Amino acid sequence: MRRASVVLSIAAALAGGCAGPGSLSNAETTPRFRDPQLSVQDASQWLAPGRTTRQEVLDRLGPGEVLRFDTGYEVRVWRAKGARDERATPELVVLFDPAGVVRKVRARPAYAAAR
Amino acid sequence: MSARAVRLCVAAVFAAAAGLAWPQAQPGPPATLPGVTISGSKATADPVEKSYRRMVRGMDLFERRRALSPQGELRFKLLPRKPGVSLDRLELLVLGKTVETPIPVAPDRTFVLQRDPKALDENAMVTPDRKALTMTWRAEVRTPGLAPNTRRLGDLRLECQVGMEAGLYSNSPSFITRIFSELSTTPAYCDNPENRYLFFADRPIFGVTLVSGDRREMLPASRLYAAAINESNLPAELPYCDCEVLLDRTYFLPLGDRSWPDDALVVFDFMEDGDAPR
């Protein structure tokens, strides 16, 4: 079963590769914030490490994608889904401490196409 | 069947279990042959052992490809794999038919393997007193004198190659190895642009940035935490990854992207600031 899923993954990857090059669509480069007009830069400047709470972040930005660690720390990421070139895709990453307060913020810009 | 032959069979079972890219069964110790005694008075039943010959092959590769890391020093490193497993007071042996050589393990759980023709001839195993799947292994190549929050990309490229040559890769969950897993058992894998060789930082990481001169690039989140962000099947898959208790330290690098020179620095932004490694 696992091998079957891998075969499907390879087929999907090959199919994606056959789509050919082209400019990235807006949907491929825009993180999914609750407010679609919000930029990564604006969102990062709004966040205040040591003060902004998780609930405030969820209310303003939406849930993003999450990974929780056994230590109590939690990372949430807002990024475009399904981007073909991850280097060209900006993302916002927020670290919450075990108390649910923003500890660190990273606004990753879009980089030029792979060299 | 001779004791030596039986022992080789046991080793083969362990090697096969450790090398499987896609798990075929629920996590747990690999099957053992009943009634088998592994040679050596200090042998542990069901150990997480590695081939001495293969580890020496890794050392040979390190010497051949020193250009990647001209000042680098090679050590091997032991890391915990399961919750609650302590690697303190760990005993490590080179065990062959007659060879039984203790290996000093440093407080940081690194060690150096000495070359021993007799151990090579006896196809010895490097055997800690810990059970299979409780710990994992990596090669470690470090250039002395770097800042504590930095590594050198060439060192890490060589680490990957030595690790592959030495057979220190382990089974990984499908979300990491979706496409390339069966191709990922040779040093050439490290040059693959899509390689996902898992590195472990000294402490939990928040971000990783590549720096070369004026060029700086933060790694995308997809290269951190073993690509586990938003992985819906994580609780079921994680036990198959040797990153299970090291997830917050795990990252993989664009090793095959030669636009980054070997002298590029890998700079860590740790979750908690401070100098003391966890």
Image (cartoon, coloured by chain):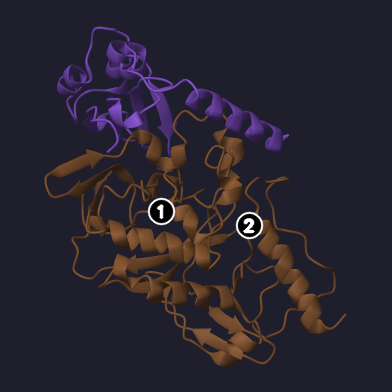
Chain colours: A purple, B brown
Could you tell me residue B221's position as x and y percent?
Answer: 35, 34
In percent of the image, x 70 and y 71: which residue is there?
A: B45
Q: Earlier in the sequence, mark 2 or mark 1?
A: 2
Q: Which residue is mark 1?
A: B199
Could you tell me residue B187's position as x and y percent?
Answer: 48, 60
Q: Chain of mark 1?
A: B
> In front: B273, or B54?
B54
Q: Residues within 10 Å of mark 1 (few under 14, many from 20)?
A: many
Residue B205 shown left or right of residue B197 in the figure: left
Q: Chain of mark 2?
A: B
Residue B19: mark? 2
Q: Label 1's element?
A: strand
Residue A34 shown left or right of residue B49 in the figure: left
Q: Are marks 2 and 1 in contact (CB under 8 Å)?
A: no
> In front: B278, or B58?
B58
The C terminus of chain A lies in quadrant: top left
- Which residue type does callout 2 highlight? Gly
Does residue B128 show up? no
Q: CA distance from mark 2 to mark 1?
A: 17 Å
**Depicted B269 relative to depicted A81: above or below:** below
**Depicted B109 relative to depicted A44: above or below:** below
Does residue A73 show up? yes
Q: Label 2's element?
A: helix
Q: Quadrant of residue B95?
A: bottom right
- Which residue type does callout 1 highlight? Phe
In percent of the image, x 62 and y 90: which residue is there?
A: B99
> In front: B140, or B87?
B140
**Depicted B217 relative to depicted B128: above or below:** above
Q: Residues within 10 Å of mark 2 (few under 14, many from 20)?
A: some
Could you tell me residue B251's position as x and y percent?
Answer: 39, 46
